[in-house]
Structure formats: structure tokens, C-alpha cells
Image: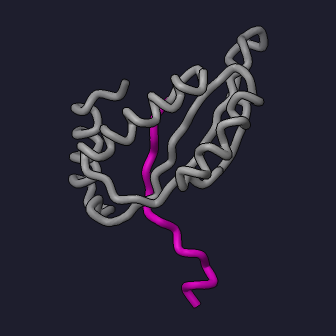
Amino acid sequence: MIAREILQEMFDGIAEAGEWDMSEPMMWGYFFTHSNKDSLARVVPLLRARDYEFVDLYQGDKDDPSDVDLWWLHVQRVEAHSVDSLFARNEQLYEFATEHGLDSYDGMDVGPVEIPAEHNA
């Protein structure tokens, strides 16, 4: 579980860098892992029904060829978060992973919402 203090440090670091206004909607990526690709693929429609956009389902790199396969599911959603709302979102996604027998909800990343090039013309 990602501690609230870690999320606070993340928000503080972003504020100090001054690149993004975190009160605005941002592109939030969320990641799940499992040793079986099909188990992750099965939850994609469930996440889409919750307004998450599918990004990728891929096999993680191995340090050693004998390591067990680890598959990653990346979904994303545009939303605005505070430390508390992100903490609550993470709790929901940890519960989702447990409910559906996934190995883990591995956390999130964030970036600005990209505006497609055709909109910049």
C-alpha cells in the first residue's frame, strides 16, 4: 500500500518543480501486475466500465531468463486529484486487484493531458 506520506512527497515535489498545476485534470496512469496475461486481460472490460482507458498489456523485462513471467496492465484516466483523493483512488484499486485475484496493484504515474496535434493547428 502506498502511504499517504509518499503521495504528499510526490505532490510536494511536483509543486516545487513548478511544471504542472496539480489542481487541474492530469493524465493518471495506473498499473496492475500478474503472472498470467489472461488474468489481466479479463479485467480490462471491468476497468473500461469504470471509465479507465486501456493503454497496454505487456510482459515485464526479466533480470534472469529463469525468472517467472510478470505481466503489466496499464490503464489511464484524466482526473484531478488531491493527496487525499489519490490515496482513496489507490485504496479502490488495491481492492479491485484483490477482488479479481491479481498479483498486485503496483501504483500510478502522472503527467499533463496531451492535446492531439490536430487540435494545435
Measuring from the top left, give residue 31's x and y in whole percent. Answer: 54, 37
Q: Quadrant of residue 111?
A: bottom left
Asked if the stretch drawn in magenta spans residue 67, the answer is no
Horizontally, residue 22 falls left or right of residue 96, namely left
Horizontally, residue 98 falls left or right of residue 34, namely left
Horizontally, residue 95 falls left or right of residue 40, namely left
Asked if the stretch drawn in magenta spans residue 110, the answer is yes
Q: In the rendered structure, which segment of residues is drawn in magenta? A: 106-121
Q: Quadrant of residue 63?
A: top right
Q: Please tell me which residue lies in front, 118 or 79.
A: 79
Q: Give the vertical position of 82 relative to 106 (above or below).
A: below
Q: Give the vertical position of 45 relative to 120 (above or below).
A: above
- Of all residues, the one furthest to the top in this rendering is 66
Task: Kindly identify the residue that appears in the image at 22 percent across and 40 percent down.
Answer: 8
Instruction: Give the quarter of the figure containing the C terminus.
Output: bottom right
Task: Kindly identify the residue that appears in the image at 55 percent across and 85 percent down.
Answer: 120
Task: Kindly identify the residue that appears in the image at 47 percent across and 65 percent down.
Answer: 113
Q: Give the vertical position of 29 relative to 26 (above or below).
A: above
Instruction: Give the quarter of the figure containing the N terminus.
Output: top left
